[in-house]
């Protein structure tokens, strides 16, 4: 997994019209992306509209950030790569997928710097319908669909969603509610405790 | 499980000193209880201090509300009985405990009126350290300890906490993030999907 770069602090400019990339263009695109995602959620947001908001050519947005998914990850400062996460879970024998899911998930969440922006998204989603829609659409398009596509099981969408719900619940208990002893056991013990349980969702 | 009565709307009064129960005394005790729990969390809050805040005799608080736990449930408008929840999970063969846990949990969460105050507590806990402490202490003292006490398993605290984390994660995905298809399957299907997985935490 890679750490996405920390975006430049956005600032607003009054200037309209397309222009080439300047020193603050990157930050302005990220700021425009945050506005677009907040307003139209993930599925309906577009690079074209984001470029329009920032007053630049869509090609420049692609040049700086790549795909809509990559732009979203940078705009939200999300410190993981969804293809890598899916790959780590799916690569290897299926009967180790439960343990790999727990290990991969907590490799990100166990790091306070990396979990902070994810927790911020979850927190927003809990108190704001639009933020919940954004998180749901991103999670489906970006991570869940990749894991689901790599499995050949009945009810695979339900199973993956149930597995993820367990991991998210564990993260809440460990890092927010801080329920002991669950909050303090090392990740290795968590893998032993939870891995075989998550594995059930990967067994036909 | 029983629905706790909806408390009277609190209003503040300037009067000090102990006095007998009047028409608003119940509401004032509930208001004092909310202040005490918010300030001192669950373990350190006391009926005596709550009575002091409300300017009444502690015996009157006991008379109206019973134990500290019962007062907490009414003050937070939590619409379930922790002894009943624990009883429903623990009563019957251990190899049905997973399914009973899922069924009991979603009988409360599936009802929008009943889940609203629980969700409100969880939401507060996510953005406020004191609220997280309150929720953690209440959950431990009230529900988790009863379920843990009824089990004869190694690592039973960890297992119960992991099981609860799964249920909480599912509730978030179904009722807040609204991830489909998980959000829309009937409770009966959820019991079939998740019950055997939770059961793993109840197997030695």
Image (cartoon, coloured by chain):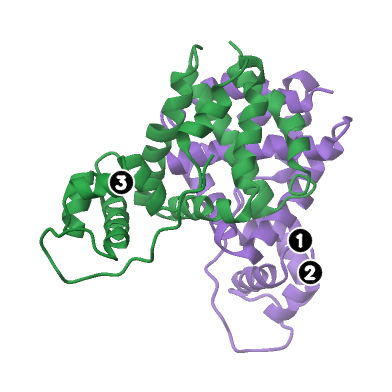
Chain colours: A purple, B green
Label 2 in the same subunit as label 1 = yes
Residue under the image location 61 percent in, 35 percent down: B104
Q: Looking at the image, is B198 positioned above or below residue B64?
A: above
Q: Chain of mark 2?
A: A
Pointers 2 and 1 in contact (CB under 8 A)? yes
Q: Nearer the viewer, residue B167 or B11?
A: B11
Which residue is disc 2 drawn over? Answer: A46
Quarter of the C terminus of chain B within the rendering: top right
Which disc, if any, is residue A68? 1
Pointers 3 and 2 in contact (CB under 8 A)? no
Which residue is disc 3 drawn over? Answer: B41
- Quarter of the image where one finds residue B200: top right
Earlier along the polypeptide chain: callout 2 or callout 1? 2
Q: Chain of mark 3?
A: B
Q: Nearer the viewer, residue B150 or A60?
A: B150
Q: Where in the figure is residue B26, as x and y percent of width and height? A: 30, 58
Report the mark closest to the observer, 3 or 1. 3
- Give the spatial CA distance, label 3 vs label 2: 46 Å
- Give the spatial CA distance, label 3 vs label 1: 44 Å
Q: Where in the figure is residue B1, as x and y percent of width and height? A: 54, 39
Assign a secondary structure to mark 2. Answer: loop
- Give the spatial CA distance, label 2 vs label 1: 7 Å
Assign a secondary structure to mark 3. Answer: loop
Locate residue A187 relative to residue B174 in the image: left or right. Answer: left
Pointer 1: residues within 10 angstroms few (<14), some, or many (20+)?
some
């Amino acid at each position: 997994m890679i750490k996405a770069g920390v975006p430049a602090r956005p600032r607003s400019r009054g200037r309209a019209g397309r222009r080439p990339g300047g020193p603050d263009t990157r930050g302005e695109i990220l700021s425009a992306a945050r506005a677009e995602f907040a307003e139209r959620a993930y599925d309906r947001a577009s690079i074209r509209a984001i470029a329009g908001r920032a007053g630049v050519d869509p090609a420049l947005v692609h040049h700086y950030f790549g795909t809509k998914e990559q732009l979203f990850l940078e705009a939200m400062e999300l410190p993981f790569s969804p293809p890598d996460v899916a790959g780590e879970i799916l690569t290897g024998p299926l009967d180790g997928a439960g343990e790999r899911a727990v290990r991969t998930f907590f490799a990100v969440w166990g790091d306070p710097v990396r979990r902070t922006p994810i927790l911020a998204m979850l927190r927003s989603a809990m108190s704001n319908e639009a933020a919940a829609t954004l998180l749901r659409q991103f999670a489906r398009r970006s991570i869940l669909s990749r894991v689901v596509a790599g499995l050949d099981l009945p009810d695979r969408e339900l199973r993956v969603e149930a597995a993820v719900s367990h991991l998210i619940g564990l993260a809440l208990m460990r890092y927010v509610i801080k329920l002991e002893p669950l909050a303090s056991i090392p990740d290795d013990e968590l893998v032993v405790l939870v891995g075989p349980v998550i594995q059930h969702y990967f067994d036909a």
